[in-house]
Image (spheres, rainbow, N blue to C red):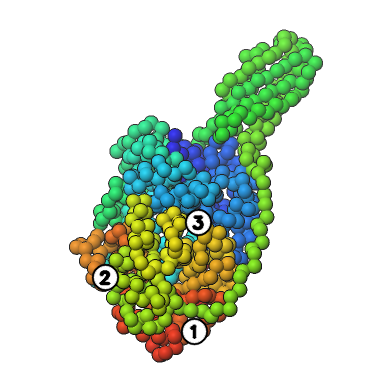
């Protein structure tokens, strides 16, 4: 049966999830997880949580799914070792450096690919499995057909989101919170700017075109289980325990009883939390304005529903453990009680305790029924006697207190054995020291990327870029062979695509003359480019945030990497450059890439024209078309560093000029500014995160 995975943003939420039927819970420790604003757990709390859950047959997954800097990796290594020794059942990871670290310091701890890895194709899921990840958490935007295809073709377990908040941007690719408020979603500090009002091609007037309704797939649990989904994830680590109890309980019943939710259950889900209702459109391969909604600030709490939920799981321990008892009382020998229960993995755990030696009965001898009755008094524990077997010699007596002590000792030993079933046998290792990074005497050069065919001109070529990035979808409209003797060209694969696009992308790469390289943004790109006579360059979608990530990408066959634009100058400088590194030093930085087209949602589609969002401050955010009728929302101001020498002292091999909304003439003028040939300064610019960094 598919696993119900519930959120545990606090101890109370964990208890609510366990008591209401979760098969597993996911939780963060400290600040290294995608919900840093949740209460989260201390290392000691985490150990206690694992013991609590394992005793009741519930798995625990550690969320370590954020980008970490070099200075944070040692603390992450300690957390990984602690989680493994505590018996965590798996760790969710986004960062490639953390992935490599986990394999070394906690080699027996299973790894799950977080949805922050942006995995949405069969090729990507299979590559994750080949790297050793036991489970892949798919992007929320996939349809049932997409999910079915991946389940059929991937050897790893597949986890899908079934209920809760939907992000407007693909997970792992959102920089809106970081660039606007210095709170990075990739580091667990998202300020949810998508829930704010924006105007579409007009001033902001209170509409919320980026605020998606919550997902609710409770009607399709059996279908997802039948297609091979291993885990159904319920979102909500920022929600209160009563919410977790209500949602977990309903999903538990619906899945167990192989039915659709009743009208009452659907209403309870709505009352617990919703944004103008729910949506299941992504699952059905649909998108549009009907998916969007918001939650009024003063929405009343469902007091009766939450009070009933809390009362149900606080009244008594609902997750009991069946135990088989075998008690032996012989003359002249200590009384013995053997207790048995099954672990989560199906293995039987057996514990034996010895007590006092029975005495000869003075008045009335102890009977087997009386002994059974006393052994059955397991109140205050999670254990319920399922079978009790008695071997009792005639004419003996043993006090009630002695029998109680025997029972307590045996059950305490059984509890200890059930709680500590994984960690004790696991290996712990040390992180291998990073090799020396190669040194280069080459001075920093410039590359540039274009968005539209008309931006590729003779004048731009005359600026002598070492490389020009061209989107794959633009390649049919330009003739690269006209310029290939004067520069090199790199095809940029769409960051978001589907399994059926893989063969088409490979064919375009194979058939386009003049290409020297290809830029990849996620694991799903690697199978597409494998074996092609092209240099593989890691693009910014790879979210390179530390030196170990660079080493990992090098081991995957990449020959260069663009570092995250959320890194500040000192962090870029201190990276060990195991690959030649590039950073974006000019241009509108991408804030979001969205499955929904916000322009079409607002009315007639006009993606071929100029479009924008406006916020409450009057800032304008250009909205560019992306492959598959998706959108890429750009920052309102361009990153400009030409007048600052610091970017040249970071050990970068290249600085990239990212041209998006610029005219062909503006592209050339800006390039010349970076070459020192003019003193152009944009009217509305930002230093981005180059000096500020992010939380």
Q: Please tell me the numbered disc located at residue 356.
A: none
Classed neighbour count for the residue bearing mark 3: other residues with Cα under 10 Å, few (<14), some (14–19), many (≥20): many
| Label at residue 94 | 3
Relative vertical location of residue 73 with respect to residue 609 in this rendering, above or below: above
Where the N terminus falls, by quadrant?
top left
Q: Residue 353, percent across and down?
A: 71, 27
Instruction: State whether residue 366 is above or below residue 482.
Output: above
- Name the residue beneath numbered marker 2: 611
User: Which residue is identified by label 1?
Assistant: 644
Q: Earlier in the sequence, mark 2 or mark 3?
A: 3
Q: Secondary structure at mark 3?
A: loop
Residue at the (28%, 69%) spot, across then down: 477
Above or below, 192 against 444 in this view is: above
The span from disc 2 to disc 3 (Cα, nearest Å) is 32 Å
Q: Residues within 10 Å of mark 2 (few under 14, many from 20)?
A: some
Residue 132 x, y percent position in the rendering: 54, 48
Residue drawn at 36 percent across, 43 percent down: 148
Where residue 522 sits, quadrant-wise, is: bottom left
The answer to whether residue 456 is left or right of residue 49 is left
Tell me if I can see residue 341 in this picture: yes
Name the N-terminal-most of marks 1 and 2: 2
Q: Residues within 10 Å of mark 1 (few under 14, many from 20)?
A: few
Q: Secondary structure at mark 1?
A: loop
Which is more toward the observer, 254 or 405? 254
């Amino acid at each position: 049966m598919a696993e119900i995975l519930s959120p545990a943003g606090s101890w109370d939420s964990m208890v609510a999830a366990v008591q209401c039927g979760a098969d597993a819970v996911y939780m963060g420790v400290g600040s290294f997880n995608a919900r840093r604003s949740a209460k989260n757990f201390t290392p000691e709390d985490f150990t206690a949580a694992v013991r609590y859950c394992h005793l009741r047959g519930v798995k625990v997954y550690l969320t370590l799914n954020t980008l970490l800097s070099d200075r944070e990796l040692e603390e992450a290594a300690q957390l990984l070792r602690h989680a493994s020794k505590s018996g965590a059942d798996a760790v969710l990871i986004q960062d490639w450096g953390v992935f490599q670290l986990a394999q070394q310091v906690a080699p027996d701890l299973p790894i799950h690919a977080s949805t922050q890895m942006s995995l949405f194709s069969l090729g990507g899921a299979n590559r994750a499995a080949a790297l050793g990840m036991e489970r892949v958490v798919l992007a929320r935007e996939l349809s049932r057909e997409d999910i079915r295809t991946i389940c059929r073709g991937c050897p790893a377990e597949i986890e899908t989101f079934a209920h809760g908040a939907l992000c407007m941007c693909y997970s792992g690719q959102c920089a809106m919170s970081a660039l606007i408020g210095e709170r990075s979603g990739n580091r667990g500090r998202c300020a949810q700017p998508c829930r704010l009002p924006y105007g579409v091609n007009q001033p902001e007037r209170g509409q919320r075109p980026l605020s998606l309704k919550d997902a609710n797939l409770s009607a399709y649990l059996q279908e997802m289980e039948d297609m091979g989904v291993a885990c159904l994830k319920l979102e909500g680590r920022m929600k209160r325990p009563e919410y977790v109890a209500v949602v977990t309980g309903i999903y538990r019943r619906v899945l167990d009883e192989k039915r659709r939710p009743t009208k009452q259950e659907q209403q309870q889900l709505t009352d617990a939390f919703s944004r103008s209702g729910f949506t299941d459109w992504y699952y059905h391969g649909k998108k549009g304005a009907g998916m969007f909604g918001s939650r009024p600030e003063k929405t009343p709490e469902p007091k009766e529903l939450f009070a009933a939920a809390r009362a149900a799981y606080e009244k008594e321990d609902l997750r009991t453990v069946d135990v088989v008892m075998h008690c032996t009382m012989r003359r002249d020998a200590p009384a013995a009680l053997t207790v048995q229960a099954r672990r989560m993995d199906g293995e039987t755990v057996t514990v034996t305790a010895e007590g006092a030696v029975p005495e000869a009965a003075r008045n009335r001898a102890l009977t087997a029924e009386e002994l059974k009755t006393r052994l059955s008094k397991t109140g205050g524990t999670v254990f319920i006697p399922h079978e009790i077997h008695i071997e009792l010699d005639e004419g003996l007596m043993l006090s009630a207190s002695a029998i109680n002590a025997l029972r307590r000792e045996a059950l305490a030993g059984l509890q200890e054995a059930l709680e500590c079933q994984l960690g004790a046998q696991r290996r712990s290792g040390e992180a291998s020291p990073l090799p020396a990074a190669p040194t280069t005497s080459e001075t920093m050069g410039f590359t540039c990327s274009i968005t539209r065919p008309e931006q590729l001109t003779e004048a731009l070529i005359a600026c002598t870029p070492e490389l020009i990035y061209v989107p794959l979808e633009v390649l049919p409209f330009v003739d690269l062979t006209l310029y290939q003797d004067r520069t090199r060209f790199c095809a940029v694969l769409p960051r978001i695509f589907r399994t059926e696009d893989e063969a088409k992308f490979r064919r375009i790469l194979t058939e386009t003359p003049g290409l020297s390289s290809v830029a990849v943004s996620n694991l799903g790109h690697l199978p597409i480019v494998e074996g092609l006579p092209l240099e593989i360059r890691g693009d910014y979608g790879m979210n390179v945030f530390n030196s170990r990530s660079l080493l990992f990408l090098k081991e995957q066959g990449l020959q260069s990497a663009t570092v995250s634009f959320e890194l500040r100058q000192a962090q870029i400088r201190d990276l060990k450059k195991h690959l030649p590194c590039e950073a974006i030093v000019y241009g509108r930085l991408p804030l979001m890439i969205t499955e929904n087209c916000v322009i079409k949602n607002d009315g007639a589609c006009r993606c071929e024209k100029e479009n924008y969002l406006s916020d409450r401050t009057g800032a304008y955010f250009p909205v560019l078309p992306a492959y598959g009728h998706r959108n890429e929302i750009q920052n309102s101001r361009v990153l400009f560093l030409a007048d600052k020498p610091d970017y040249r002292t970071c050990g970068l091999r290249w600085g990239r000029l990212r041209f998006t909304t610029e005219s062909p003439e503006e592209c050339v003028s800006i390039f010349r500014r970076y070459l020192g040939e003019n003193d152009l300064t944009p009217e509305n610019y930002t230093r981005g995160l180059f000096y500020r960094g992010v939380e």
